[in-house]
Amino acid sequence: MKKLKLFTLSALVMSFSAFSQESSISIEASQNITNFKFVNSEGIQDKNYNVDYSGGYALGYRYKLDFGLFFGAKLGMRQAGATYVYDNTNYQWRLNYAEARLQLGYSYSFGKLAAHINVQPYFAYLLKANQRLNNEDFDIIDTGEMKRIDYGLFASPGVSFQANDYINIYLDLNYMFGLANLETNEAQTSNNLLYGATLGAAFTIK
């Protein structure tokens, strides 16, 4: 049995080594449009939440095989939030997350240009959460109104340009849906939503 496992592992290593590989590190910045999906205790979604505008940045590592498959990981910071107007009161939520992502995708090259798609499961930890009511600010972590853990999925199609042998410039369009309920009141649910664009540069490791 041990010999069979060793043979299988060796075969997998040899199959991957038959292809050329490329490793790179990346740095990127994002401009995002964020919102909440809120469902009240009666199961009715409140569609009066409005978008907020925020940003994010990340460092990453990517491992790519020559037939286009790639995988990697990212670490970064990201903002989230929404706005709401009710009974002449202006509400704004601004959340700051530390975030880790895995990524798996496929890229198809047209010379120096390439198109790609990747999916990125994420895990995020809430560092700061501010709620503004008109001109008054509240820390909603201290008040216990919001959970600190969020997780979900990014879907990111994009394009890239190979500037030279060492630098690749890319642009991703992102859609993110949070799967974790942010509410401490389990009778209702809030999920993070995001649309955005990411501009980044990947540096090949030779």
Image (spheres, grey):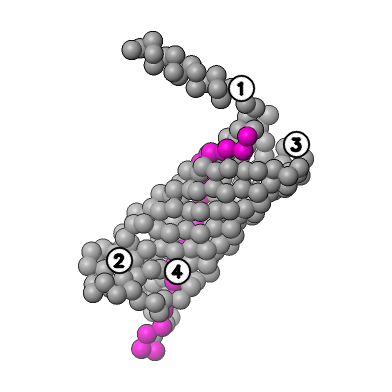
Q: For the N terminus, give its image quadrant.
A: top left
- The span from disc 3 to disc 4 (Cα, nearest Å) is 39 Å
What residue is pinned by disc 4? 35
Return the x and y of residue 62 as percentages of the image width and height. 57, 38
- Magenta segment, which residues? 67-88
Residue 189 is tagged as 2
Task: Kindly indicate whether the residue at mark 1 contacts the one at mark 4 (C-beta within 8 angstroms).
Answer: no
The numbered disc on residue 161 is none
The residue that appears at 38% across and 53% down in the rendered structure is: 151
| Lower sequence index among marks 4 and 1 | 1
Residue 16 placement, left or right of 160: left
Badge 1 or badge 3: first in the primary sequence: 1
Q: Residue 73, percent across and down? A: 51, 41
Q: Residues within 10 Å of mark 3 (few under 14, many from 20)?
A: few
Confirm or deny contact between disc 4 and disc 2 (CB under 8 A).
no
Find the residue positioned furthest to the bottom: 88
